Image (cartoon, coloured by chain):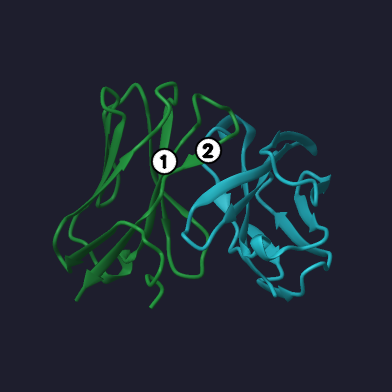
Chain colours: A cyan, B green
Amino acid sequence: DTAVSQTPKYLVTQMGNDKSIKCEQNLGHDTMYWYKQDSKKFLKIMFSYNNKELIINETVPNRFSPKSPDKAHLNLHINSLELGDSAVYFCASSPSDRAGGFKFFGPGTRLTVL
Amino acid sequence: GESVGLHLPTLSVQEGDNSIINCAYSNSASDYFIWYKQESGKGPQFIIDIRSNMDKRQGQRVTVLLNKTVKHLSLQIAATQPGDSAVYFCAENSGGSNYKLTFGKGTLLTVNP
C-alpha cells in the first residue's frame, strides 16, 4: 500500500558506471518529480513530468535522463557517474490540481559513487 | 551523529515545550507555502500548508504563520514530543509556479526527553 516507492534504496557504484533508479506511485497522480538532496540536506528539484510530458528540467547535466513510460512511473537513468552525483534522490508525485505544492515523497535512494 | 558536518540551523527543546521554527522565503510572487518534516532515512512528509491570502493556519499541534511583508514563515509545534525530532523544511511554489517547489535550508529539531 506504499504511495510512492523507489528502488533501490541504496546504490553503491564506481565512477563512470551507468545506473538507473525506478519510481512508481499508486496514487493516481498526474505529476511526478525527481529531487536531489545533497550532504547538507539541501533539496533541489531536478525534473518534473506531467502525464508523461517533461515540464521542468532544472539545468541538470544531460548525463541524467528521466523516462516516464506511463504516468505512474518515472525512472532516472544516470550515465558516466561522477563523485559529485553522490546524494539521496527522491521521487515525488502530486495531483495536477495541486501540483504547485503538496507533494508525496518516496523514501529516497542513497547513491554513493566511489 | 547525523548532525555532524551538516551545518543546519538547529533547535533543541525539552519535551513538552513549544517549538518555533523560522524560515525566510525568497520570491515575493510565491503564493503557496508548505512545511515538511523529514525524519532520518525517510522522505519529506507534508505537515501543513498555507496560501498567501492567509496569515495563519492551524493544524493538530501545529500552526503556520505567514508574514508576506518580510517574506517570513514560521512553524509552531505545541507540546513538542520526542517523535517530532526531525529536519523541518519550508517550501514555496517558486513565484507562483504550478509545478516547482523551492525548498529552504532546513532546521534540525531535537527534542530532549
Amino acid bearing label 2: Leu
x and y, in percent, of residue A14 in the image: 77, 74
User: In the rendered view of the protein, which quadrant contains the C terminus of chain A?
Assistant: bottom right
Q: Residue at x 75, y 74 (%)?
A: A13
Q: Secondary structure at mark 1?
A: strand
Q: Chain of mark 1?
A: B
Count of numbered badges drawn on the protein? 2
Q: Residue at x 77, y 36 (%)?
A: A54
Q: Secondary structure at mark 2?
A: loop
x and y, in percent, of residue B106 in the image: 39, 53
Q: Chain of mark 2?
A: B
Give left or right: position of A58 versus B4: right
Q: Nearer the viewer, residue A75 or B71?
A: B71
Q: Estimate the spatial distance between the alpha carbons at disc 2 and disc 1, rounded to whole Å.
A: 9 Å
Amino acid bearing label 1: Ile
Tag 2 residue = B101
Tell us which disc is closer to us: 2 or 1.
Answer: 2
Q: Residue at x 80, y 52 (%)?
A: A63
Mark 2 and mark 1 in contact? Answer it, CB < 8 Å: yes
Q: Is residue A108 above or below residue B91?
A: below
Tag 1 residue = B34
Give left or right: position of A64 versus A27: right
x and y, in percent, of residue A74 in the image: 76, 50
